[in-house]
Image (cartoon, rainbow, N blue to C red):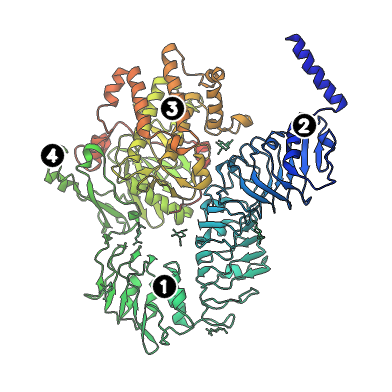
Amino acid sequence: MMMARGLVSMLCFMSLVYGQSTPDLASMNALRKSLTLPTGFGWTETDPCLWKGCQCDTSKRITRIQLGDTSISGTLPSEIGKLSSLTVFEVMNNQLTGKIPSLSGLSSLQRVNLHDNRFTSIDADFFTGLSSLQSLDLDNNPFGPWEIPLSLKNATSLVEFSANNCTLSGKVPPDFLGGLTFPSLTTLKLSANFLVGELPMSLSESPVQVLLLNGQKGVEKLNGSISVVQKMTALTEVSLQGNGFSGPIPDFSGLVSLKSFNVRENQLTGIVPSSLTELESLSDVALGNNLLQGPTPIFKADMTGLNSFCLNTSGTPCDPRVNTLLSIVEAFGYPVRFAQSWKGNDPCNGNGWVGITCSGPDITVINFKNMGLTGTISPRFVDFTSLQVINLSQNNLTGAIPQELTKLSKLKTLDVSNNHLYGKVPDFKPNVVETSGNPDIGKDGLDLLQVPLVRLPGIVARKHLKKMQYHKMHPQQDSGDQDALKITIENLGASGSESGLSGNDAHLVEAVNIAISIQVLRDATDNFNEKNILGRGGFGTVYKGELHDGTKIAVKRMESSIISGKGLDEFKSEIAVLTRVRHRNLVVLHGYCLEGNERLLVYQYMPQGTLCRYIFHWKDQHLEPLEWTRRLIIALDVARGVEYLHSLAHQSFIHRDLKSSNILLGDDMHAKVADFGLVRLAPEGAQSIETKIAGTFGYLAPEYAVTGRVTTKVDVYSFGVILMELLTGRKALDGTKSEEEVHLATWFRRMFIEKDSFSKAIDKTITITEETLGSINTVAELASHCCAREPQQRPDMSHVVNVLVSLVEQWKPAERSRDLEDINGFDYKSFFSQMGLGGSTSNAGNTLTSFPSQPPEFENTFKSGQGR
Ligand SMILES: *[C@@H]1O[C@H](CO)[C@@H](O)[C@H](O)[C@H]1NC(C)=O
Ligand SMILES: *[C@@H]1O[C@H](CO)[C@@H](O)[C@H](O)[C@H]1NC(C)=O
Ligand SMILES: *[C@@H]1O[C@H](CO)[C@@H](O)[C@H](O)[C@H]1NC(C)=O
Ligand SMILES: *[C@@H]1O[C@H](CO)[C@@H](O)[C@H](O)[C@H]1NC(C)=O
Ligand SMILES: *[C@@H]1O[C@H](CO)[C@@H](O)[C@H](O)[C@H]1NC(C)=O
Ligand SMILES: *[C@@H]1O[C@H](CO)[C@@H](O)[C@H](O)[C@H]1NC(C)=O
């Protein structure tokens, strides 16, 4: 043994001193053997460090192989994957063929240049572990059809990725480009391939400066909207030429570095925005051969090739009728069909503008029936005072019928049947408007109906809330607010005998009014007195309050600056969700207020505040740390609330912002999930929906952070992080910790794998006994499972509930009977009292809301608005 070790060190010593052998000799010999080198190339020395184009470091390891433009042919052997000190590998402009072998694990490799060869394929494992790779060029190789392998995600240092003209097929990978995976990526060139489909939303967060996607060669090409470039503010050069992109050119005002923009030969429609024509940095623009509409813009752009401008002379405005028609179709997203048909500057010239009928120069009929239109009805129809008939039936229009249209004095028919319109129908003359086939027409106010109705699960499913109606409330004694909304719930449980609700009771439920006037809330909070502030969130301030009857409430008041846009969306989302879902582990919404600029939500008060308070701040707040069994029960409460959200009959809500500061505790220390501002309705089936990323760092599932795609598994991940917090007493993100401990989920998984160190990770305040240890281990395992990297590897919430139930059962038989008394966890008592049945709201539960000051967690919240 001793002798062997001595021998090895002696050999090493010899190789260093005499340079006789390098650990890379065998690999380099294999390379020499599989290449066909031109005569006189050399590579005859025994030491490969001396070979032409090769370089070694002081330990005689090969660091560079640079054989570009050397007329070599042959193939690359798999042995190059063993050159573990390699930093640069260049063989461009040769006649190499065969497969590009895996370079998996070459963690020093920075630059790989393989362009202009005859390689026929690339190993799917090529990128695995290439954590230092900055630049890769694969251009002009005759690969068989291939897609960018998942392993590329390992190459997180990428700066330049070029794969032009190398038979790349399929879609641009959804999470390939996200700034979170590739924070340094500045150049992305994928021209002249066979890519299809739409640009992924993740691109919008990418720091890419040069984006070349032009000239896809398949019959199908890249298509859909180019709106994603609007947010790519680092762009300097964009080439999207020769694809199937459609829709309008987005706002370019943020792209202050853009020099070159080529979108020739697509199907772009709409008016060229002034944000593009006025962009100072721009020197090179090509817009020809699209379907662009409106006036021919004045600016130095290559316009050769056709468009659908109204006039050929730059800068001359279009006929007012054309402008109005363009406004109308703008609200539909400028469909290609109109851009193709509407040529020139006179809609009444008899050239068959699709959908338009004139009498002389006046438009009298607009008939867009059954054209597959989406979007909304523009109020600009009103400009055509001679209009007699508007037919928009059998499309997919949303929004309300604009009030303005009642001013069209000659209008005989407005047919909007069979769309998805909602809102109050304006007062037209009798028999003018036809609205049949719009299920939500007449429902008012908030476009709550973006969130379709849901059914309650289990027993309740049979007596589900059939219909909710929203209509304006008329001024009343107790609330003089004109805008307050009234929510009427009709037909609750009309058929269920188990419900305990007779037909009469159902009648009683009607007209439950959850609009609360601002004056009531001012009184309750002492005019929003600072001393009543419980916390501040990204969207407003939460106050504690007390109603006249003594009911304690928590009032969330939105900042007026965020009332429009995303803030309003979240406000609506929260009302929409909370009025539809009832569960004892979800916080109860008592009502809301919409008056003037005020937007307030009123919740049940939760006296013990957030879970954060108990696991991170218990010392400052003079609280007792939570015992293990209590943590288990809280975890189970949260799991049940989330399971319920995920499994509402055949529809499913995704919370998207689960975190310990959104978990509230009642005096009985049972937990409820709060903050439904980001909730999304999950699509049917297993597919995901793309949204703008919103949520809180530290709790974001990786696939969501990168692609914005959400499934219920995003919540499962966040729940896993909460379990880790309960186990360790550490925050999801803790900036005060060292680099490798900042991110709880990453650190936890590492600690969990190293079984020895795992016990050190457990919160010191948890008393570890033989009894608790088993259950701690099970929860740790569950937490890791929930935080699995791949969403499909994470369990469903129902599985999580089962695991936790068995632990709680084992631990606290007494708790069990209370916790398991109803299978659905549906809080009937609270629900019925909310509905005005049986008891006042004040005994709605011993569970009450509060949002004690938790600035750190709130500040971590970032919400970049919401996509659809
Ligand atoms: C595309 O790549 C092929 C080799 O696969 C090459 O022959 C051809 O010249 C390349 N096209 C361009 C425009 O460079
Ligand atoms: C690298 O890629 C492989 C293959 O896709 C994947 O299994 C692995 O998790 C990745 N490793 C890292 C560190 O991302
Ligand atoms: C884009 O092309 C795909 C086929 O590659 C097609 O399914 C999809 O509908 C197209 N999308 C648009 C917006 O044209
Ligand atoms: C613009 O010019 C083209 C080519 O000269 C001609 O075909 C087209 O009719 C013109 N369009 C208008 C609106 O005058
Ligand atoms: C509008 O179009 C629909 C669908 O073709 C048709 O059924 C309806 O009669 C039209 N309405 C009027 C007023 O012409
Ligand atoms: C209309 O829109 C809904 C939802 O936006 C969609 O599910 C449906 O497929 C659309 N229908 C048509 C005919 O486009």
347 to the left or right of 136: left
- Distance of mark 4 from mark 1, alpha carbons? 52 Å
* Nearer-N-terminus badge (3/1): 1
Please say if 245 is above or below 695.
below
| SS at badge 4 | loop
Residue that carries the numbered disc 4 in the rendered image: 497
Residue 328 circle label: 1
Q: Which of marks 3 and 2 is nearer the N terminus?
A: 2
Q: Distance between the residues labelled 4 and 3?
A: 39 Å
Q: Ligand 6 is found in which quarter of the picture?
A: bottom left
> 204 or 335, which is in the foreground?
335
Task: Classify the position of the C terminus by image quarter.
Answer: bottom left
Q: What element carries label 1?
A: helix
For disc 3, the marked residue is: 782
Q: Which amino acid type is marked by label 1?
A: Ile
Element assignment for label 2: helix
Residue 391 location in percent, x, y?
Answer: 31, 74
Label 1 beta carbon within 8 A of ligand 5: no
Residue drawn at x 39%, y 22% is 630
> For the point 48% across and 50% down, which residue is it?
692
Q: How many marks?
A: 4
The Cα–Cα distance between marks 3 and 1, rounded to whole angstroms, is 54 Å
Compare residues 275 and 515 and report the one nearer the observer: 275
CB contact under 8 Å: marks 4 and 1: no
Q: Mark 2 points at which residue?
A: 25
Q: Of the two numbered discs 4 and 1 on the same chain, state the one appearing first in sequence.
A: 1
Q: Which of marks 3 and 2 is in front?
A: 2
Q: Residues within 10 Å of mark 2 (few under 14, many from 20)?
A: some
Q: Which quadrant is home to the N terminus?
A: top right
Identify the amino acid type marked 4: Ser
Neighbourhood count class around disc 3 (C-alpha, 10 Å): few under 14, some 14–19, many 20 upward: many
